[in-house]
Amino acid sequence: MAEKDSAAPKRKRPLGLKARSAKKANTQVSEQGAQQVNDFDDENTATVMLRGEDANEIDELEGIFDSALEALSEDQDEKAITLLRGTIHESDRLLRLSDTENTQLEPRFYFIYGSALYGLAELSPEIDDKDMYLELAQHRLEQARETMGEEPFAWRVYLGLAKVHMEIAAEADSENSACTGAQQALEYLNQTISALKKAQIGETLNSEILAAIDLVLSLADSQRLPDSAAAKLVGWGESNARLLVETTDDAKYLLARALWLRASALIDDSDEISDKKEFSRLLTEATGLLGKTESCDGLLLLGEIEINLGNVQDDESDMENMYKQAVATFRRAQAKGEVPEQFIQFIDDFENE
């Protein structure tokens, strides 16, 4: 069987954080009234545009956190880590101040704090106290959940809790704990979808649901979970992708991916298939979903499925035809992006027989 490369990308270790006094010393005010903060020296510099003169300290905290998210979207992991640590540092200060003055912090604060803790745990897999970061992230996000009521960002809180529980499941040291964490994550994802619908965010609704499905299937495919926990995630991903499959090609791709993962679960460690009929049925349905795909990811998945369909053909000519189809699919993928080495090797082996 063709192997799928599911190795997780390498992440970088977090950087240190300067004191808040250094930030104040390096603050400038732009013509628009926003504060430009140069918070770190030399290669560790991170510039943040804080909110205007009317902004409170929670607004400024949100500005730092939003800058971290922007850095992540631009694949600037080192900068994102720096800003996440800055968010946590500032959150700690505001929490101490609130305790001293006996004031109540708003739900948005706890959401930002918890999300930053989770983000740092995710970006820093080598961190010694990752479990502590996840536990703290869960605690802060639960505080947001308990006090947020019908806030428009409620879905983000539920999504944050789902992500934390997925990571807890992946870090669990027993199958039972992993299954419990996965189930809790899915319950929060269901609440995420309900809150998204209440928020009436229009076209963004389906894209956020698709992003959640992608997140779930990625973890299921990461080999970080026992099979039983991964199966829970795949089942949730499949059922929710089916609800959107008529709306977008992205949903078709995700549904095909879920079907592929279900089929893969039928292959044992000796590359034997426990139920060839079900295996073929799942992959045939997935092939139909990907028949018109033009994306590189879609073509790579289609090619891999075609190889595996070829592997279960009883007739040698049918097997060769499926392999030939897979080669053509991978060639199309090569014209659109990078093709993993194992598929390039398959092409070479097939064409040089």
Image (spheres, grey):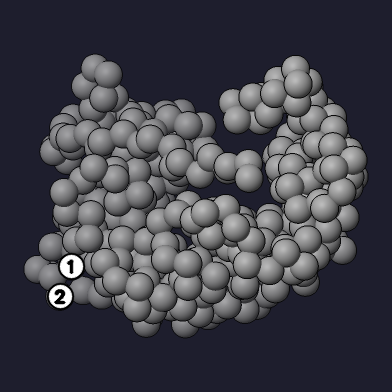
Q: Nearer the viewer, residue 129 or 80?
A: 129
Q: Nearer the viewer, residue 217 or 328?
A: 328
Cα distance between the residues tagged 1 and 2: 6 Å
Question: Residue at the location (38% across, 47% down)?
Answer: 65
> Eyeballing the image, is 347 above or below 209?
above
Q: Amino acid type of disc 2? A: Asn
The answer to whether the residues at label 1 and label 2 have Cβ atoms under 8 Å apart is yes
- The location of residue 72, given as percent across then percent down, is 46, 38
Circle 1 sits in a helix, a strand or a loop, which is it?
Answer: helix
Q: Nearer the viewer, residue 343 or 162?
A: 343
Q: For residue 260, which quarter of the picture? A: bottom right
- The location of residue 248, given as percent across then percent down, is 82, 55
**Quadrant of image for the C terminus:** top right
In the displayed image of the protein, which residue is found farthest to the left?
A: 100
Circle 2 sits in a helix, a strand or a loop, which is it?
Answer: loop
Q: For residue 214, which quarter of the picture? A: bottom right
Instruction: Count neighbours of disc 2 (C-alpha within 10 A) and say few if under 14, some if 14 to 19, many if 20 or more.
Output: few
Q: What residue is disc 1 on?
A: 98
* Residue 102: assigned label: 2
231 relative position to 60: left or right: right
147 relative position to 94: left or right: right
Q: Nearer the viewer, residue 81 or 173?
A: 173
Q: Amino acid type of disc 1? A: Ser
Question: Residue at the location (63% across, 41% down)?
Answer: 2
Question: Residue at the location (44% across, 42% down)?
Answer: 8
> Eyeballing the image, is 254 above or below 4?
below
- The location of residue 158, given as percent across then percent down, is 48, 72
